[in-house]
Image: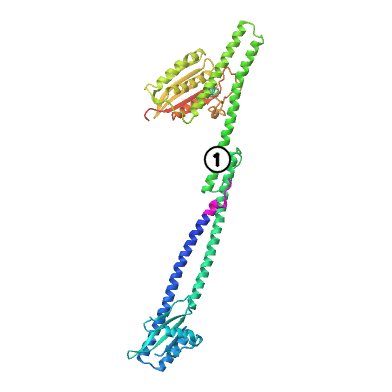
Amino acid sequence: MRISIFNSISVKLGTLLFVIFFLLVISIESILYLFFVNFYTQDVVRELTQRSDAYAEVLSEDFDEAILNYAGLIESTSSKMIMVVDHSDNIIASSEGITSLSQDYLEEVIHHGDEDHGPIIASDWKNEDYFVAQSFIQHDHQAGGKVIMFSSTHPVREAVTFLNRTFAVVGVITFIISALLIFIASNKVVQPLLKIIRVTKLISEGKYDWRLRAKGSDEIAELSYAVNQMSKDIQNYQQQRTKFFMDISHELRTPLTYFKGYVEAVLNGMVTTEEDKKKYLHLLYNQSGQLQRLVQDLSDLSQLENEEFTLQRTRTSIETVMVNSLEFMGPSIEEKGIELTYELSPTPLYVSGDEQRLQQVIINLLENAKKYTPASGTIKVSTYQDKDQCVIEVADTGPGIPKKDLPHIWERLYRVEKSRSRDTGGSGLGLTICQKIVALHTGEITVASEEGVGTTFQVRLPVWGS
Ligand SMILES: Nc1ncnc2c1ncn2[C@@H]1O[C@H](COP(=O)(O)OP(=O)(O)OP(=O)(O)O)[C@@H](O)[C@H]1O
Ligand SMILES: [Mg+2]
């Protein structure tokens, strides 16, 4: 699956940031713009009307030529212009700049301002060159002309152009910053993510040797570590599975070879005496028994490893489990010439357990002890309570297990003496099954062994109600 550029996180993130930035800048700029233009123009117009009012008031009191000239003189030095017309609309005084205005424009301004119009003649800074305000001169309650004042709208337009340019520059900068953020996000987030996708695809295709280079402790690095771990786990699992199948086929091949050999011998007429026939049939019987046991163990194991498997747990007496197991295994142990002693807890011990499965564990341990302990050896079984745990021990005076093998005896099909004859050896599933059953009981099984001294298996289970 290819990720389209529009679906890329960095582009989505960048666009979002750009939109947020842009909206922010636009709103700030609009607010600035409105405030500035409104305040500025209002201020100019107010000042203009105040000034023309002031002149008109003075002239209403004393319509003197000296005052007229004085007003023209003062306004010549300011950025504004003044013009005074008499009651017949003739210009009787003006500041210097007025002459630069066209006659038509002046006429229009003069005639626009009749008394019923307000003091402001022009305030449209966008379309007109001047703000214009007028004030009327009164002589003894009679119209005596008017004062008209001009102030250029050019500075406002210039400021607005400057503002617009600034906004454009800020917009471009916003765009560049967003592009930069997209680039950084792409490098820091998207590229590593794409790498992770590529490696997970390779893993799903069975290429487990691929590893991600994980640095730091951020979420991407955590994800990379997790993917690497997952790859390692799958690789381990696959290797174990392959090994298991190889071992199983080996386990099945050996008895089948025996079977074939015996049957061939009988078919080829190589077995003649009744005694030989009996011997061969006995061997076949033993082999089929072992095969049956192997198949049973495998089915047990797959059942126990099934996530949905549940134990039939009830209040189980440890004494009952032990007595049943000892009754089952005792005779054959003693028959081998091994001394069997037991020391069961004087106070009754109960656990929440599956009686049949717990018995299977103890029988497996007793079988091992019997199998590996030579005649005249001893097997000692004991139970006791240790805090809120019920402890079961099966100790023997057998050959012990080498230190290097100890961690592996729980593995499926693991046997210490691989070349041991099939008559004494099992398939190496017994302890795996024991460990699974004990774990399902939330208990623990451990081993202590010393070569030449013996082996002790210890099972710990939570006592009933703890
Ligand atoms: N009491 C013991 N003394 C010495 N070695 C032992 C003892 N119990 C187990 N082992 C070693 O641990 C290995 C694994 O034991 P496990 O019970 O899983 O397999 P097994 O007895 O060989 O076969 P199975 O139980 O499937 O018939 C054995 O092959 C044996 O080498
Ligand atoms: Mg065993």
The quadrant of the picture occupied by the C terminus is top left
Name above or below for residue 305 compared with residue 67: above
Question: Which residue appears at 52% of the width and 56% of the height?
Answer: 15
The total number of labels drawn is 1
Question: Which residue appears at 48% of the width and 13% of the height?
Answer: 331
The three-letter code of the residue at mark 1 reads: Gln
Question: Which residue appears at 61% of the width and 20% of the height?
Answer: 254
The quadrant of the picture occupied by the N terminus is top right
Residue furthest to the left in view is 141
Residue furthest to the bottom in view is 65
Residue 419: image x %, image y %? 61, 22
Name above or below for residue 279 compared with residue 422: above
Q: Nearer the viewer, residue 209 or 397?
A: 209
Residue 321 visible in the displayed image: yes
User: Toward which corner of the image does residue 323 lie, by quadrant?
Assistant: top left
Residue 325: image x %, image y %? 45, 18
Which coloring applies here? rainbow
Q: Is residue 5 a member of the stretch shown in magenta?
A: yes
Residue at mark 1: 229
User: Toward which corner of the image does residue 148 lie, by quadrant?
Assistant: bottom left
Q: Secondary structure at mark 1?
A: helix
User: Toward which corner of the image does residue 239 lie, by quadrant?
Assistant: top right
Q: Is residue 37 a member of the stretch shown in magenta?
A: no
Q: Which residues are magenta?
A: 1-12
Q: Nearer the viewer, residue 233 or 139?
A: 139
Q: Is residue 410 left or right of residue 386?
A: right
Q: Nearer the viewer, residue 206 or 242?
A: 206
Q: Nearer the viewer, residue 20 or 123?
A: 123
